[in-house]
Image: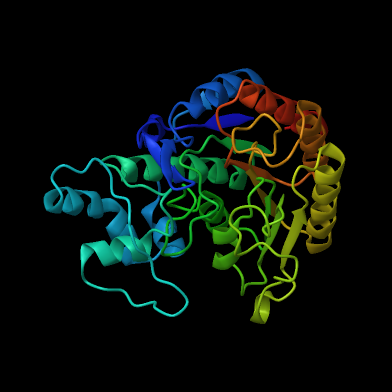
Amino acid sequence: MITYFHPGELGHHVRTRLYGGRLVEALETPGRLSALHEAARICTDAVVEPEPADRSIIAEVHDADYLTFLETAFLAWKQRFPDAIELRPSLHPNAYMRRLPDDLLGRAGYYINDAASVLLEDSWEAAIASAASALAAAAAVRDGKPAAYALCRPPGHHAYRDMASGYCFLNNAALAAALARRTAGRVTILDVDVHHGNGTQTLFYDRADIQTISIHADPRTAYPFYAGYADERGIGAGEGYNLNLPVPEWSGDEAYLAAVRTGIQAAAAFSPDLVVLALGLDASGADPLACMRVTGEGFARMGEMLGAIRKPTVIIQEGGYPSPVLGDNLTHFMAGFRASSGA
């Protein structure tokens, strides 16, 4: 199995995040790649730099004006606020107000959902590099490889068609699925990150050709709070093709893996031609954002279960933040996945 990783992902060095009314140290930083990159060198066959991202796929998934905003907004922000080192919105639309204004302050809040999704001078370059890794892995699997791993950062599964959210700007799993759908009849996106893949769900909520399954902490008490409930099943042609499997907070291996098993059964019933696996390692009890207690052994078992699907699989890295076991958890997962999939 090949790992795809673009060095441009080492940009976008956010210093702080807003938490509990205070600015505290950011966790989604380039530093979290060190352990994952080192682990990938050991537990996959090679780490390869991808070709530049295919912009036509990105334009298929994301709104054109949103993409222009991501690429150009920081420069405009810097011209208006010369001392600023980041673009962090201070207001946002809501269920009662949803117009797109002309003013930069209003557009920033429209296109960025929360205070965690900060834009810096090189944020666009990092996001497009992350997308390039996802698309290269998807192309490798499309072209016959049984599996490929995209070491993506920033992550992607919270990003909507026209809105950044939860550290995510471009939805890497959705990009991989869109590329796969150009040749595959059916695609399943199976998300095991501890936070619900709200952006991914929304992008495909009315489609029957791309099944979306998410195993995650119960949103009644965990981010993203406003989506990820079991009664969200899809609409129109997509009704029944979205499955959310919320797990009570602070669950351990058995409860989390039981939900993964249910997700695998749903995927088997759908019978996809290709699986996009959104791999979060933040269900670990050692994660700094911990809300679960999945162990290294649990990740190995999870990998074994998912590898046993025996479908062409694109593995997209989502969450998983700096901890002493972050790299170990990737190694455990890959060992299980490769042993059962033969990849």
Which residue occupies the foreground of this view, 47 or 195?
Answer: 195
The answer to whether residue 44 is visible is: no
Which residue occupies the foreground of this view, 273 or 241?
Answer: 241
Query: Which quadrant of the figure contains the C terminus?
Result: top right
Query: Which quadrant of the figure contains the N terminus?
Result: top right
Provide residue 257's location: percent of width, then percent of height: 83, 43
Q: Residue drawn at (69%, 27%), measured in percent from left and top?
A: 329
Provide residue 85's location: percent of width, then percent of height: 24, 40
- Look at the picture and state if 323 lies above or below 92: above
* Direction from residue 279 to residue 37 in the image, left or right: left
Provide residue 190's location: percent of width, then percent of height: 69, 52
- Look at the picture and state if 341 lies above or below 223: above
Q: Residue drawn at (75%, 26%), measured in percent from left and top?
A: 335
Provide residue 97's location: percent of width, then percent of height: 39, 78
* Direction from residue 154 to residue 36 in the image, left or right: right
Query: Residue lying farthest front?
Result: 21
User: Residue 321 sits in which quadrant?
Assistant: top right
Numbered marks: total: 0
Q: Residue drawn at (42%, 32%), measured in percent from left and top?
A: 6
Which residue occupies the foreground of this view, 117 or 147?
Answer: 117
* Direction from residue 33 to residue 240 in the image, left or right: right
User: Residue 42 sits in which quadrant?
Assistant: top right
Q: Residue drawn at (76%, 57%), measured in percent from left and top?
A: 245
The answer to whether residue 320 is visible is: yes
